[in-house]
Amino acid sequence: MLYQCDEGFYNLTLPHIVCYTNGEWSEFECLPACDYKNATQIADGYIVQKKSRWYTVNDKTQYA
């Protein structure tokens, strides 16, 4: 089964869950997401982008 997060949320794990041999399911969590492209722009500067375009709770970005 494929799981998706609602708009404005982002999943940091794979988009499916796994049933383990102990009978428990793997984690799937939707966290609030921010697209780095919507971050505040500064004059004569830019965001140093990380590997993903999505940021979530307590993520930080850096300007240069």
Image (tube, rainbow, N blue to C red):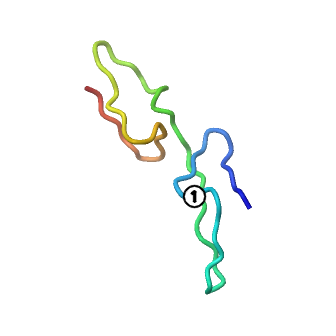
Residue at the bottom extreme of this rendering:
22
Q: Is residue 14 left or right of residue 38?
A: right
Residue at the top extreme of this rendering:
43
Residue at the left extreme of this rendering:
64
Residue placed at 69% from the left, 55% from the top?
Answer: 3
Q: Which quadrant: the N terminus?
A: bottom right
Give x and y (percent) for residue 7: 66, 39
Residue placed at 34% from the left, 17% from the top?
Answer: 42
Residue placed at 37% from the left, 39% from the top?
Answer: 50
Helix, strand or loop under label 1: loop
Q: Amino acid at mark 1?
A: Leu
Q: Label 1: few (<14), some or many (≥20) within 10 Å?
A: few
- Asked if residue 13 is positioned above or below residue 39 in the image, the reply reads below
List the residue tagged with mark 1. Answer: 14
Residue 24, located in which quarter of the rendered image? bottom right
Give x and y (percent) for residue 4: 68, 50
Residue 52, located in which quarter of the rendered image? top left
Residue placed at 39% from the left, 42% from the top?
Answer: 51
Q: Is residue 30 left or right of residue 64?
A: right
Q: Which quadrant: the C terminus?
A: top left
Give x and y (percent) for residue 25: 64, 74
Q: Nearer the viewer, residue 64 or 14?
A: 14
Count the labels in the image: 1
- Asked if residue 40 is positioned above or below residue 28 in the image, the reply reads above
Q: Is residue 20 left or right of residue 58?
A: right
